[in-house]
Amino acid sequence: MRLQLEPAKPASALRDILHTAALALLLVPGAAKAADTDPTDRIDFTTLLYGEQSRTQIFEPVVRFTHLMSDGQWVSGQLGIDVITGSSPTGALPSGIVQTRTSASGRTITSPAGQIPMAPFKDRRVSLDGQWQRPWGRLVSSTLGGHFSREKDYQSFGVDGKFSTDLMHRLLNITIGGGVSRDSVFPVGGTPAGLSAGTIIHTGSNAKNVSNVLLGASRILSRVWMVSVNGTRTFESGYLTEPYKLITVENRVTGAPVSSLTDKRPSTRDRSSVLLSSVYHLTDDVVYTSYRYYWDTWNVRSHTIDLKYRRVLDADTYVEPLLRYYQQSSASFYTVGLIQGAPLPEYGTSDYRLGKLRTITVGGTFGFRAGDVPGSFTVRGQYMRQAGDGSPPNAIGIQRNFDLSPSISIFSAVVGYTFDY
Amino acid sequence: MNGVSSAPLLDRVEDYFVGTFRAMASPCSVLVDTDDPTEAEALLAVAEEEARRIEEKFSRYRRGNLVDQINHSNGRPIDVDEEAALLINYAVTCYAMSDGMFDITSGVLRQVWTFDGSSRVPSRDAVRNCLRHVGWWRVGWKQPTLTLPAGMEIDFGGIGKEYAVDRAAVLIGQRTRSSYVVNFGGDLYMSGPRRGSRTWGVGVDDPDRTGEVALYRLDVSRGGFATSGDASRFVRRRGKRLGHILNPKTGWPVDGAPRSITVFGRTCMEAGTLSTLAYLQGPRARQYLEKQDVQFWIV
C-alpha cells in the first residue's frame, strides 16, 4: 500500500484528497441535470488595459470561441484588436537643452530639457488565431495552429503544431512541437540604414523569419504535485532592427548630445530558454512556482521567478496573488551612447529593452460568478516596477547628471468573462 | 424496517419527522427537525427523487441506462455526461489512492462469486479467467470519453449509495435551514445540531443482529457515516466466513478483515470510501484508519 510505504505523508492527506474529490463532484451546480446540458461551445471575452506611466497605453479586447466535438476534438478561433497609444523612448540620451528631431514620417518632435526623448505613436493591431486539436487513440493528441496579425508597419503570418503523448500510465506527458512565422516589417517613411543619421535606403518591406522548436515533459509525482520542464529554441533571421530607435552621439568630454544615429542589430538571433515549473495542490488551494532561464546569441541572459497562490474561497470564488521577479543582462552591442569621433561599432542599440533590466511585478486575479448570470468572471490587476541601469559607469559629462534609465511603473488590468453553452 | 411498500411514508416522532421509502435495494429515511409537515414532506420528496434519479442512471441492473450502454459498448468509445465523468474521476482518485485495490471494474467477479451464505466457492481457474476482465488500467479514460474493452464492466455500487446520500443532502440543504439526516441503507449524512443544541443519535449495529442491537450510540452533529462489512452478504469456506468485498488483484474475498467498519467523515462519500479502503486492507484495517486521522468504529 503506497500510503504505508511513505510515512512522511501527512496522515490526513488521503482524507483531504477524497474530500476534495467528493466536493468537486457534489458542488457541481446542476450535476443533477448535467445529462442534457453538456456544454460543447465556449466563448471567452477578455479586455486588457495596459498602461506604462506616461508611456504606452494598450487597450486590447479579445474574443475567443471554442467548439468541442464529441470525439474529443476541438477547434478554436480568436480575434483580437489592440489599440496602442502613447510614447516610447527613442533611445536617445537626455540633455540640458530642448532637443528637436524629425521623425521618419516628417513630423518634428521636441523633447524637454533633461528628459529622455520619447517618440509618440498610435497604432492599431488586428490578430486572428486558429487552433485544432485532435486525439489519436487514447494517449496521443496533436494540435495544429495558425496566426495572422497586421498593424501599420508589421505583419506576421505563421503556423505551428505539436504532438503530445501520455506515458507511464499517464503519469508522464511529453510534448514536441515547432512553428514557423514569416513576418514583414515596413517602417513608416521607409527603412533607414543602420547606424546612420536616418538615410532611407528603401521604402519596401523587410523580411523577418522566425522558427522555433519546443520540447516539454510534465510528470505527476503524486495526486497533489506535478512538475514540468520545457525547453524552447527560437531562430530569428532577417530584419531584427527597431527602425524608430536612436542612439545619441555625445561630445567626448561634456557628454552633450551632438547628433543621433539609427539602431542596428545583427540579422540573426538564436534564443533558448528552459522553464521549470511546479503545481502543488493543497486541500483546496494551489501553489504555482516557476523559474525560467533565457539566453540568446546577442548575449542577453535573463532569470524569471514566478510565484502564484490560488486561494479558493468557495466553489465559485478564488483569489490568486502573484509575485514575479525578472532580471536581464544587456545585449553585447547595447550602449547608452556613442562618442563623437570614435570608430563606429558594427552594431548598436540604446533600446532599454536590450539593456540591463530588473522588474518586480505584484498582482492578483479574482475569479467569481455573478448571481444567476451564467459563466464566470475574472479580474486581474498587475503593478510592475521596472528599473534599468540609471547611472552606467561609462556615462560621460552631463550624462552623469541624469537618470539614464528612470524606473517606470506599469499597470495592467484584464477583465475576462467565460461562458459555456 | 422491513419496508416492502415503495411509497414514501411520513411519520412524526417526538418533535421531528421521519420519512421513509425504499430505493437502491435498501430502506431509506430522511429525518427533519421541524414542526412543519409540509416542509418535511417536500424534503422527503426531494431526497426520494434524487435517490431514484441516481439509481436509474448509475445502477448496473437497469437496461438502457448509461452504465448499461458502457457495459455493452464492446470496446467502442462512449461519451459520458459531466456528472458521470466526475463520478468516474472520483473512482479514479480512489483507484490511485488505494494502489488499485478500489476498482470499479471488479464487478465482473460476481459472475463467479455468489454471496448467499452458502458454501459455493468458484474454482481457481474460473477466478483467474475472470480476472482478465478486471483492472481499471485496461480502460481508456480521457474525459469525456470512456473506452471499456469488451468483456469488462463497470459498477458504481461501491460509491453510488454514498453519492446519492450526499447529493440528496446537498439538495435538501439548499431548501431548508432545519437540521436533517439522510440515511440510505445505513450510509448517512447529518446536517448539524438539532434545535436546542441536541444531536442526532446514531447507532452502530451488531453485525450479527442488524437493526436489533446497537453496539455503540454516537452523538455527533455534522458529517457523514458509512459502514463496510459482511453483515449479510458472505459465503462460507471451510467454516470461515468470506465477505462480499473482493480483492480485484486476486479475485478472492478480502481475508482477515473486521466484521464491520464504520467511519465518520465530512461527507458520506469520504466516510464510505475510507471504510471500503480500510476493509480492503484486511487485518491491517485498524492500522490503516489510525493513520487517516479519522473517527472510526471497528466491530
Image: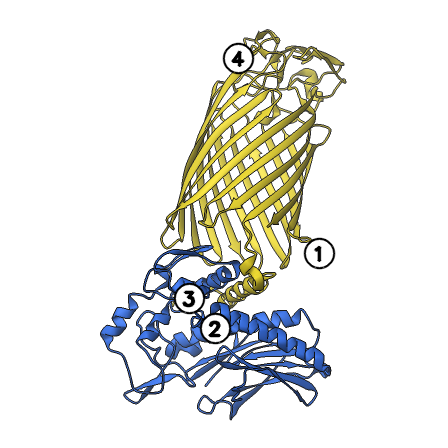
Chain colours: A yellow, B blue
Q: CA distance from mark 3 to mark 4?
A: 77 Å
Callout 1 crowding tier (Cα within 10 Å): few <14, some 14–19, many ≥20: few
**Tag 3 and tag 2, C-beta contact below 8 Å:** no
- Residue tagged 1: A371
- Residue tagged 3: B68
Q: Which amino acid type is shown beneath numbered disc 2?
A: Leu
Q: Callout 4: residue from which chain?
A: A
Q: Which amino acid type is shown beneath numbered disc 1?
A: Gly
Seen from the viewer's position, the closer of residues A190 and A142 is A142
* Residue B201, visible in the rendered structure: yes
Q: Is residue B34 left or right of residue A393?
A: right
**Displayed quadrant of residue B251:** bottom left
- Residue tagged 2: B274
Callout 2 crowding tier (Cα within 10 Å): few <14, some 14–19, many ≥20: many
Disc 1 element:
loop
Seen from the viewer's position, the closer of residues A370 and A73 is A73
Disc 4 element:
loop
Residue A343: x and y, percent?
54, 8
**Tag 3 and tag 4, C-beta contact below 8 Å:** no
Query: In which quadrant will I find the N terminus of chain A?
Result: bottom left
Residue B156: x and y, percent?
45, 69
| First in residue order: circle 4 vs circle 1 | 4
Q: Which amino acid type is shown beneath numbered disc 4?
A: Pro
**Tag 1 and tag 3, C-beta contact below 8 Å:** no
